[in-house]
Amino acid sequence: MKKGTAVLVTGASGFLGKRLTSVLAAQGFRVHAVVRRRPMPGLLGVRYHVGSILDRRFAAAAIGSARPRIVFHLAGVTKRRDENLVRVNAVGTGVWAAAIVASGLAPRVVFASTCEVYGDGPTPFQETQPAHPLSAYAHSKRAAERILEAAAGGRGFSVAILRFSLIYGPGHKPGMFLADIVRAARAGKRFPMTEGRQRRDFLHLDDAVAALLAAAKVSQRGARVFNVAAGHSVTLADLARLVERLAGRRFVGKGSIPYRSDEIFNYVVSTARARRELGWRCQVALEAGLSPLIVRRGGRRTARKAGSVPRSSPARRALR
């Protein structure tokens, strides 16, 4: 992507969208950010479009105003019991796909999906294997993928579907295992968990942004799926021991809660296609990514602000 290119980011106020938007703005792109409410303060040089992801007129107006070469579609609901889960993730994606088709533009669309669409399928997860979603969240993301695949067919725009593993990093909101155990470590609280036999793949936020940028550069026809993960899984029990070591104390109550009925135990992901076709690979090792979120140095925590982007981050390097 060249500096000055018009890009549109849906879900720009979210965990992933906020970091992507800040990287794009810092590098001189013409960024149009779609948000539910305007942040205060906003990022310099970013034009904000405030509205509902489900509003067809709003979507058409934002696309028409931005006339983007690249659309990063990151908007979505991740809370598993949210009553708007399917409407926002699936129907909302249909609204924006229709707006892109109606605009007559042919942007590159990069969509943030999830490796959860593989469910309890064979591992390591490969893009060529059938999807087998187990949760409502995974079903909603798979439906969104299908909508974009159908819209891209013969319509002049291409779609990169990035199936992310579990993303963590500065600014991660509570509700996911890694974010919650880090918060417990920092707050000095006890953390209840299962026996921890589940294997998970954790991807640093900067690596996720770098993958989005790499996917935006690739030229292709139709839709293409890419797994984006660290490519190295750990058990939750081992992760808990690592966090305890970094925190310098024992605080995890292993085995104090039962497994969920829809638990995916073997979450192992192949990233060979992303390495080969996008030129992307994970750069931030798990301990290196976790340490600044937990460790105190000189009496102060070393965690970065959610919007800051280090010069050495994979996200910055991906734009060079």
Image (tube, grey):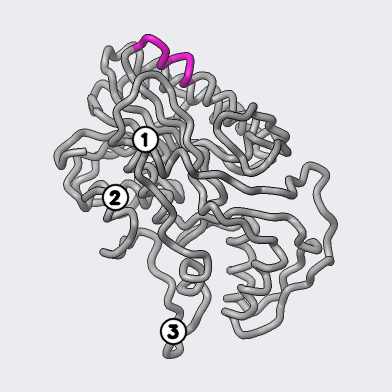
Q: Residue furthest bottom?
A: 298
- In the picture, measured across the screen, residue 1 lies left or right of residue 212, that is left
Q: Distance between the Cα atoms at labels 3 and 2? A: 31 Å
Q: Position of residue 70 (x, y in %)?
A: 29, 31
Tell me the residue that label 3 is attached to.
300
- In the picture, measured across the screen, residue 188 lies left or right of residue 229, that is right
Nearer mark to the viewer, of 2 and 1: 2
**Residue at x 33% of width, y 19% of height:** 157
Question: Marks 1 and 3: in contact by CB < 8 Å?
Answer: no
Question: Marks 1 and 2: in contact by CB < 8 Å?
Answer: no
Amino acid found under the numbered disc labelled 1:
Phe
Q: How many marks?
A: 3
Tell me the residue that label 2 is attached to.
318
The answer to which of 158 and 183 lies nearer the viewer is 158
Amino acid found under the numbered disc labelled 3:
Arg
The answer to which of 40 and 178 lies nearer the viewer is 178
Q: Quadrant of the N terminus?
A: top left
